[in-house]
Image (cartoon, helix red, strand yellow):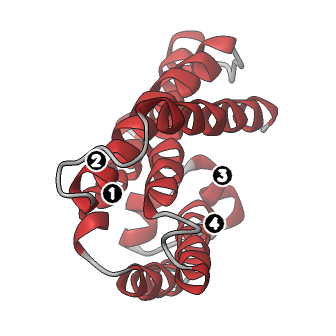
Amino acid sequence: MKLTQEYKTQSIYIFIGLIILLFPFFSTYIFLLAFFCGALVLSRPKPDSQVFGILARESDIKQGRLNGLTRLFLTMGTLFLISSIFGPEKFPVFIIAGALAITTFGDGIADLINIHNRQKNSVKVYSPISSIVFLISGGIFAFLAGEWVLWILAGGEQTIHYEFVFFLAVLGSVTGALLESMA
């Protein structure tokens, strides 16, 4: 039963990444406000609440707070704040979309692999497979997210080369996989 809940929780984290699809259609100020308000709301649930039970990862249960989601929303809000201050020309939204894709899709899929391995071994096992999955899925989804935002914002024109977006996606996913393997 607990294992099924872990799969559901990871699926919710991955589903949160679909917020990326809305990035081209709203102002950075709206996302700035939405992510900071989301962080405020997610910092409130008590460990005995139903919302906490649905959204809490294993580390959140140990700490008694939804730290993972709260930090994700604070980080995204901060990135939108930086983009709002410096302007989308200097800190483009496609970079934020790639960061969210790596964090939600890459980490979520790697955690599903870890849960599956733990189910088979009944012991917490760290393997390079989850880091490789994080690297590949994070890179692919970051590239797709970046290209989606760029394509919609540019009206179907290719304003930034694919190679540059791919380079940033791979760089971000390598960094994320490295940090994930150390955690």
- Numbered mark located on residue 59 in the image: 3
Q: Residue at x 32, y 54 (%)?
A: 149
Q: Residue at x 42, y 43 (%)?
A: 10
- Numbered mark located on residue 20 in the image: 1
Residue 88 x %, y %:
48, 72
Kind of element beneath mark 1? helix
Residue 83 x %, y %:
55, 75
Residue type beneath disc 3: Ser
Q: Who comes first in sequence, dot 1 or dot 3? A: 1
Which of label 1 and label 4 is nearer to you? 1
Residue 93 x %, y %:
45, 63
Callout 3–callout 4 Cβ contact below 8 Å = yes
Residue indicated by mark 2 = 148
* Residue 72 visible in this rendered orientation of the protein: yes
Q: Is residue 65 left or right of residue 9?
A: right
- Numbered mark located on residue 31 in the image: none
Closer-to-camera residue (176/121): 176
Circle 4 Cα neighbour tier, 10 Å, few/some/many (<14 / 14–19 / ≥20): some
Kind of element beneath mark 4? helix
